[in-house]
């Protein structure tokens, strides 16, 4: 009998060579193989009659090979195959397909799948480049001897005709075909142990009407007769739902557990009395918006609790997160603690440093900036200030986590503009700093150290107890609070997975007096008009950005574009104006100097690459010109546009396009012109790019799902989150402690397997 964890070699027909190919796709166990789901299904129970085909439809046709041949046109060889059903015939064509020359023999039965078209001249129906399978052929893949072939052939036929047939992606350069997978998966299912563990508690299964794991694995590959083809194609059968739910449920269970563990740790209960309130009021440079007030209240309430805060502050660009962060900092500082504020880039760290000094220094707070580009001697000095507790607010890049920084009494960590980090990355980062904290006493590392006690254990659940619990029960050093601030509005479903371990606060209101930004899209042959417009804005006392893309594949030449255009603009077009240049390759001092000059209004136009993308705040800038806007992603365009519209004056975003625009590029540009709403833009971005690409890099830190798709399965994700919380709230009359520990064992196995994160739970 096969278990899900049995190595895939034990499936009959899988030899070492095939096992190698499978391993290349991450298929190592029987479970991996069974989770290799069909990407579509063919209805070979009711295949279409050739005579009833209509141009334009996708169709499965089963017929008999009549004749085939290769003919050469001037441009390429074309392979033609004629398939018949009685008197009807259908032509299939493949371009450049000399490899098909000897593939077909008249009389063979064949299944075809593809788009039906009408030939322009003859008006006959044909299918171009269909996918095909010669039915009952067992010549591919199998490593079995010839003796077994006859019997196999018969069995194989029953998997391929007269039913809904699963179609798998071929792998190993076509060595493992859909047909191979059908047989291997069938064999694995036939020999699968009858008692698969059921890790989902009964009450959850009942609420969601989940079928058993075994039935789900069978039916997802071999649908029950009568199953709807539409439900199959859209992954909405009970079998799909069970597998998808499981995957989401155990991710959410891990996140929820993490959340509870964090709350079980000792934190600092910050006092929020009259003197702290007075200090808060003193620094405020303006009336907070009601969203800012509400969010600060949430944060302050968290900070007052005796366990560590883990909160995500989400707000569109320009919604005023910085001041909220500063206020949280004051609460900590007034309680005698230090605060670390980390930004993703040096420019941003610097900017925070300047605004912190502007806003906080008058009130007597001691602020330091610690970045990688400082001289060693200066760094040492600052470190000493931090270690001695003199520095109250320490601002730096994320490298603060890695550098050997020792705090005297770290109370709060603020992580700004974390929109490129997902939960998996964050957990890994924390794990890393957690390890280093053992010997280097990195103050910030402590907040990451995984807790040993689990909430299930708190609730008196047996297994999973770790021997170190007794020690960790003792009040250790208090964990600092953590506030993560993100600028990218994240659709709720994504927030649930990405930040499921954090509590969420949303700034959903812009500060008053902002006029909506006007966005226009123009081809770059109209640049003279654009420059004229920029000139008018500058004449009115405003400032402008002109941004060029830096695209990773060809950073060098793109950089040149920015530099070249800087020469052109500063030397000719705007020769009489003060124009600056900012890009990532400038050394830090220079960057700093340019940024400061722009901030002070000493530069009127800033030519830049996307280094200014995040966070930069110069309210007097009213124009954002983006060249080659068609090359930018939506999130990036939105971030860039977020640099303007920060003051009372009306602001303008000009998207200049050059060259060919893809259909998707056009949709991005249209969306930018249509709306300023970051949430709408994020939704569309997610739709266009898919979750993996959503955060701008492949390493988005999203859990990688095998069967789930968080866009398609948003509702299941919500259900999974709800159920995970309900299960961990037990044991009670609904969920027994045994069920909880079974679920936790499964959750740990999955997390470890998929993410290599042992410490979760
Ligand atoms: P982000 O959320 O993008 O980090 P910032 O914190 O940089 O936004 O704030 C954007 C701009 O709005 C800044 O110039 C800031 O000073 C200003 N601002 C923030 N809150 C308010 C408010 N309540 N009233 C007026 N201006 C505000
Ligand atoms: Mg900001």
Image (cartoon, rainbow, N blue to C red):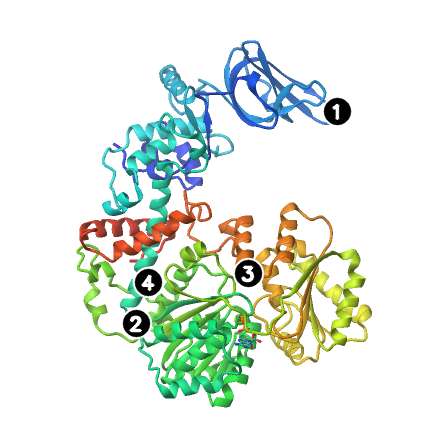
Characterize the local packing of mark 2: few (<14), some (14-19) or many (20 or more) Cα atoms within 10 angstroms: many
Check the picture and name the quadrant holding the C terminus.
Answer: bottom left
> Do residues under tags 3 and 1 come within 8 Å of each other at their CB atoms?
no
Chain-order first, disc 2 or disc 1? 1
Q: CA distance from mark 4 to mark 1?
A: 66 Å
**Foreground residue among 502 and 73:** 502
Taking the image as drawn, is residue 696 in sight? no
Chain-order first, disc 2 or disc 4? 4
Q: CA distance from mark 2 to mark 1?
A: 76 Å
List x then y, in percent, for residue 657: 71, 55
List x then y, in percent, for residue 456: 22, 58
Task: Indicate whether 138 appears above or below 588.
Answer: above
Mark in front: 3 vs 1:
3
Residue wearing tag 4: 259
List x then y, in percent, for residue 640: 62, 64
Q: Secondary structure at mark 2?
A: loop
Chain-order first, disc 2 or disc 3? 2
Characterize the local packing of mark 4: few (<14), some (14-19) or many (20 or more) Cα atoms within 10 angstroms: some
Q: CA distance from mark 3 to mark 1?
A: 52 Å
- Residue located 24% across and 63% down the image: 453
> Do residues under tags 4 and 1 come within 8 Å of each other at their CB atoms?
no
Disc 4 residue lies near ligand 1 with CB under 8 A: no
Residue wearing tag 3: 678
Mark in front: 2 vs 1:
2
């Amino acid at each position: 009998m096969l278990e899900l964890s049995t190595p895939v070699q034990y499936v009959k027909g899988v030899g070492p060579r095939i096992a190698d190919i499978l391993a290349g796709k991450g298929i190592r166990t029987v479970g991996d193989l069974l989770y290799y789901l069909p990407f579509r299904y063919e209805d070979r129970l009711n295949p279409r009659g050739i005579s009833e085909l209509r141009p334009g439809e996708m169709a499965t046709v089963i017929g008999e090979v009549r004749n085939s041949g290769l003919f050469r046109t001037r441009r390429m060889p074309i392979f033609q195959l004629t398939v018949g059903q009685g008197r009807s015939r259908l032509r299939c064509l493949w371009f450049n397909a000399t490899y098909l020359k000897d593939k077909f023999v008249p009389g063979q039965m064949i299944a075809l799948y593809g788009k039906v078209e009408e030939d322009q001249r003859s008006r006959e129906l044909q299918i171009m480049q269909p996918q095909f399978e010669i039915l009952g052929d067992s010549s591919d893949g199998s490593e079995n001897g010839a003796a077994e072939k006859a019997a196999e052939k018969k069995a194989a036929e029953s998997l391929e005709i007269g039913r809904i047939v699963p179609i798998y992606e071929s792998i190993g350069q076509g060595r493992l075909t859909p047909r191979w997978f059908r047989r291997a998966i069938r064999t694995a299912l036939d020999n699968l142990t009858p008692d698969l563990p059921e890790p989902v508690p009964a009450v959850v299964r009942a609420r969601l009407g989940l079928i058993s794991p075994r039935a789900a694995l069978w039916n997802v590959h071999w649908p029950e007769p009568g199953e709807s083809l539409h439900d199959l194609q859209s992954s909405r059968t009970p079998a799909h739902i069970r597998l998808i739910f499981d995957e989401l449920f155990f991710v959410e269970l891990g996140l929820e557990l993490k959340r509870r563990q964090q709350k079980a740790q000792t934190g600092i209960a910050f006092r929020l009395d009259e003197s702290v309130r007075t200090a808060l009021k003193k620094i405020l440079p303006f009336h907070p918006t009601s969203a800012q007030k509400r969010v600060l209240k949430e944060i302050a309430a968290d900070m007052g609790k005796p366990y560590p805060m883990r909160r995500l502050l989400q707000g569109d660009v320009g919604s005023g997160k910085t001041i909220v962060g500063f206020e949280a900092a004051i609460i900590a500082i007034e309680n005698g603690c230090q605060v670390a504020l980390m930004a993703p880039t040096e420019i941003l760290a610097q900017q925070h440093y300047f605004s912190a000094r502007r806003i906080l220094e008058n009130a007597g707070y001691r602020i330091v900036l610690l970045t990688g580009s400082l001289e060693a001697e200066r760094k040492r000095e600052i470190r000493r200030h931090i270690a001695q507790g003199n520095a109250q607010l320490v601002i730096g890049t994320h490298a603060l986590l890695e550098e050997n920084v020792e705090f005297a009494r770290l109370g709060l960590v603020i992580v700004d503009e974390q929109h490129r980090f997902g939960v998996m990355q964050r957990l890994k980062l924390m794990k890393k700093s957690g390890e280093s904290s053992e010997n280097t006493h990195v103050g910030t590392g402590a907040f990451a150290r995984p807790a040993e006690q689990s909430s299930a254990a708190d609730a008196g659940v047996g297994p999973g107890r770790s021997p170190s619990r007794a020690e960790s029960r003792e009040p250790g050093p208090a964990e600092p609070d953590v506030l993560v601030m993100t600028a990218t509005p994240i659709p709720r479903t994504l927030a649930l997975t990405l930040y499921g371990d954090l509590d969420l606060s949303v700034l959903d209101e812009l500060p008053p007096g902002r006029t909506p930004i006007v966005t226009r899209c123009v081809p770059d042959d109209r640049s003279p008009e654009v420059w004229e417009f920029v000139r008018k804005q500058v004449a009115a006392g405003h400032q402008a950005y002109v941004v060029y893309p830096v695209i990773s594949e060809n950073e060098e030449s793109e950089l040149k574009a920015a530099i070249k255009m800087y020469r052109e603009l500063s030397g000719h077009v705007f020769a009489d104006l003060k124009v600056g240049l900012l890009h990532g390759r400038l050394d830090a001092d220079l960057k700093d100097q340019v940024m400061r000059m722009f901030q002070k209004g000493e530069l009127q136009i800033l030519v830049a690459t996307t280094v200014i993308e995040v966070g930069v705040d110069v309210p007097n800038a009213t124009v954002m010109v983006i060249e080659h806007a068609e090359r930018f992603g939506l999130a990036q365009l939105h971030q860039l546009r977020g640099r303007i519209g920060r003051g009372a004056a009306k602001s303008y975003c000009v998207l200049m396009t050059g060259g060919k625009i893809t259909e998707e590029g056009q949709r991005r540009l249209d969306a930018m012109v249509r709306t300023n709403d970051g949430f709408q833009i994020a939704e569309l971005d997610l739709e266009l790019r898919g979750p993996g690409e959503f955060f701008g890099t492949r390493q988005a830190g999203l859990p990688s799902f095998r069967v789930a798709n968080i866009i398609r399965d948003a509702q299941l994700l919500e259900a999974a989150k709800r159920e995970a919380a309900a299960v961990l709230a037990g044991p009670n009359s609904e969920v027994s402690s045994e069920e909880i520990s079974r679920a936790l064992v499964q959750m740990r196995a999955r997390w470890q397997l998929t993410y290599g994160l042992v410490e979760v739970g």
